Structures are given as structure tokens and as C-alpha cells.
Image: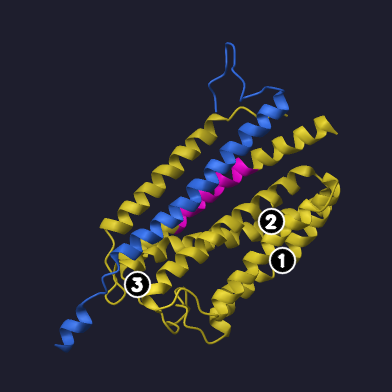
Amino acid sequence: MKGRWVDMPADTTIEMYFGFVVILGILGLYSLSLVWRFRKLRGKGDGEDHTAQEPENSSPDA
Amino acid sequence: MHHTSKPLWLWILDGLSLLLVAAALVVIRFFTPVEAVMGPVQKVFYFHVAASWAGMLSFILAALAGVLYLLRRRPKWDWVSLSAVEIGVVFGLITISSGMIWARPIWNTWWVWDPRLTTTVIMELIYMAYFILRGSLNTPESRARLGAVFAILSVITVPLTFFSIRLFRTIHPVVIAAGGEGAGSFSMTPGMQRAFFLSLAVFTVLWVDLLCHRFRLAALQDDNERKVG
């Protein structure tokens, strides 16, 4: 009885997934914020308006 | 200097970081043993410690860049310092939140004012204040100068946080301990050690990647300010 109790790890699978979702979520959101801020600044710096309809020849590079 | 086009090496670094994070997740989930008492939630530990490592590395780099800025007065050292602080705060947030999620089933509470947890929060709050300081200053030069001084002074919180579990009584596990384990520790099997060192390596690559991106952003920000000013 005692051995069985000691050998059984706690069932914390949901908590594990929750932990990884939070870690990856924060990393993902921060990465997106970097991309978003960079594009916004580049738009300002180049005098281009990224929100307006680009007529032609718009560069696809991110 | 033209900062807008993303160089090829940075694309490669992005891809490598993504690939490594995915590989580390697979190794941790499927090829790392489950801890005997805590169960699967202990696996959060690998990214928790790696994030803490990346955060502390950031704050040390911020202080070094601060020193270099004060010595040479080159804006690029301010960009490094600023980037490192921001990334350090993000990794600090990851450390704190993943630690809370790990603590909930193990300590039966989300939070306890343990020395390690308390010093980590103090460190995080101090570095958050860095942005308040910068935001309150008008010129790029004063932001850079005072930011550098702040980053140098604040780095004292890094060793304080690192050694808090060795200096004070704590329930936080001591993983990297010379000659034994501290209170609340668990011993790592070779499989666990592999996941641990892999996570440290992966987060170091990710840290470099994020730092490069944030540095480019800071450089572009500076370019724009100079154009406007």
C-alpha cells in the first residue's frame, strides 16, 4: 500500500500543458509585438502609409 | 545605416530558434522521464529555469552595455542596453508565471513570499521602472545616459536573486547546487539533465534572436527620431 502511494506521480498533466501554453503565449505575443512595432516604425520612417491601399509594386519583404 | 531590410542570417536565426523550441518541446514531452512525485508539471521546470537564465543574462548584458555607453557615448550601446532590459523583463515574466503554475499543485498555492520569489519580483519591478524612467526623459542623450546608470545599478538584483536560495531558508528548489541539494530539490536523472541543458541552449539561441530583432527596432527608432528632430 505504502509502496504504491510513493511510486505514483501526481496527475498534473493539465498543469504542465497550461505552463507551456503560457510560456509560448508570452513569447509569441512578444515576437508579434516586435514585428508590429517594426512595421509601424518603418512605415513612419519611409513616409509610406501601410494602412492605405498600395497602388502597385508593394514590397513583400517583412 | 539602413535597418529596414531583414538580413538573411536573421531569417535563418528565426527559423533555427523556432525549430529548436519545437525540438525541445518534443524532447521534454516525450523523451524525458516524469518526476516521481510531482508528475508531468515538473516538466515546466526546464523552460522555467531557461527563461530565468535568459532574463538574468539580459540584465547583465544591459549593465555591460550601459558601462560601454558611458565610456564611449555611442548610441548603439544604448540600443543594446535597452533591448536587453526589455527582453529580460519578458523572460522574467515567463519565469514568474511558469513558476506560479508549477507551484500551484506542488506547494498548494500560486504564490508565497519566499526569498527567491520576492527577490525575483523586486528585480522584475525595478527593470519595469527602467521604462518609466526613459519615458519621462525628453532627449535621446539623457535617456541613454540615465538608462545606462539605471541598468548598471539595477544589476545588483541579479546576484541577489540568484543567491537568495543559497543565502536564506527557502522552499524553492536548489537545482544548481555544489555538493548536494538544497531544501525542496529533486535529483535529476541523466534524461532530465539532457532536457535541462537542451532547454538552456535553446533559450540562449532564442535570446540572441530576440535581442537582434529588438536591436534593429531600437536602431530604426533612433533613425526616425533623428529624421524628425
The amino acid type found where label 2 is placed reads Ala
x and y percentages locating residue A15 in the rendered image: 35, 65
Q: Residue at x 69, y 41 (%)?
A: B218
Q: State the residue lying farthest toward the front.
A: A52
For residue B85, which quarter of the picture? Answer: bottom right
**Label 2 neighbour load within 10 Å: few <14, some 14-19, many 20+:** many
Q: In the figure, what tint was chain B given?
A: yellow
Q: Residue at x 55, y 58 (%)?
A: B91
Calculate the distance from the C-alpha at mark 1 to the C-alpha at mark 2.
Answer: 10 Å
Q: Residue at x 59, y 16 (%)?
A: A54
Q: Quadrant of the N terminus of chain B?
A: top right
Where does label 1 land, which residue?
A: B154
State which region is magenta: B200-214
Residue B4 in sight here: yes
Q: Which chain is blue?
A: A
Residue A42: say if magenta: no
Where does label 2 land, which residue?
A: B62
**Viewed as shown, does residue B91 lie left or right of A15?**
right
The amino acid type found where label 1 is placed reads Ser
Calculate the distance from the C-alpha at mark 3 to the C-alpha at mark 1.
Answer: 33 Å
Q: Of marks 1 and 2, which one's residue comes earlier in the chain?
A: 2
Q: Of marks 3 and 1, which one's residue comes earlier in the chain?
A: 1
Q: Residue at x 51, y 79 (%)?
A: B112
Q: Which mark is residue B188?
A: 3
